Amino acid sequence: MLALRSLLFAVFLVIVTPPCAILGILAFPLPSSVRRRIVASWAPLVMWFAWHLLGIRYRVIGRENIPAGSAVIVSKHQSAWETMALQVIFPPLCFVFKRELLKVPFFGWGLALTSGIAIDRGAAKDALTQVVEQGQARLAEGFWVVVFPEGTRVELGATRRYQPGGARLAQQAQVPVVPVAHNAGEFWRRDTWLKTPGEIIVSIGPAIAPGDMDANEINLAARNWIEAEMRRLFPHHYAATIPQAAAS
């Protein structure tokens, strides 16, 4: 049954993704806000099918921490699920993503219409400049900006170095950073097409006002909250690392 549901969901994605991308392309002459709404309609549709077909539910804690104005979301990245869920949970937003995704047929074409920030991860300094410059423009337009600071999807219980791009953008634009922790990778794993039923918990932390902090301090504050929250909510993901940490 698990394999059948996962297969049906994959077929659904193949059927629904091209029309959404094509509609977005055909709407190119229309205002960008209209194009974006057309393309963004894909995310809640996929989320609905994930819930009712795959049995992947979700619960959000900390909604009261969402600020009124634009902000930079700094989130844990474990799967493709959160790239859709964040669009449903938060106000209109755009993502910082690797430029190679634009080459993916239909998905990449739709992504190009979402006002996202495509960066070349191989050019670290230029990529940081792109995040700050383009991110400030998106924030001025009223978008939120989502950054996955670890740069790629990480395994359950793993932590990679947090890149400072999101923190630098928040510091330069003087907007808050909203940290997000979740366990999407527990049910929507990065290394298999099989999806497992269960409840994903998305925890939204208190907004971090940049104030007089520099980018490194903001980045550290976001990292500390996310990693502490991950261990508080999902200690079973980190059980294998506890003896090593204690020994060190």
Image (cartoon, helix red, strand yellow):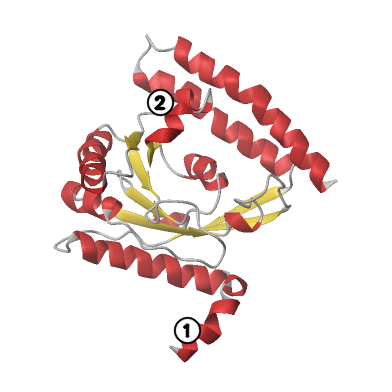
Of the numbered discs 1 and 2, the one sitting upstream in the chain is 2
Q: Which residue is mark 2?
A: 112
- The residue most toward the bottom is 247
Whole-percent x, y for residue 194 in the image: 72, 47
Disc 1 and disc 2: Cα gap in Å? Answer: 42 Å
Visible in this render: residue 185? Answer: yes
Residue 149, relative to residue 146: is it above or below? below
- The residue most toward the front is 122
Q: Residues within 10 Å of mark 1 (few under 14, many from 20)?
A: few
Residue 203, relative to residue 16: is it above or below? below
- The residue most toward the right is 1
Visible in this render: residue 66? Answer: no
Tell me which corner region of the image, top left, top right, bottom left or bottom right, holds residue 137: top left
Give the residue at x 64% y 50%. 188
Give the residue at x 66% y 54%. 187
Q: Which residue is mark 1?
A: 245
- For badge 1, the amino acid type reads Ala
Task: Identify the image quadrant of the C terminus.
Answer: bottom left
Whole-percent x, y for residue 123 in the image: 26, 44
Tell me which corner region of the image, top left, top right, bottom left or bottom right, holds residue 155: bottom right
- For badge 2, the amino acid type reads Ala
In the picture, measured across the screen, residue 55 lies left or right of residue 82, that is right
Residue 158, relative to residue 153: is it above or below? below
In this view, the mark in front (1 or 2): 1
Is 187 or 161 nearer to us in this picture?
161
Under circle 2, the secondary element is loop
Give the residue at x 38% y 11%. 30
Whole-percent x, y for residue 213 in the image: 17, 64
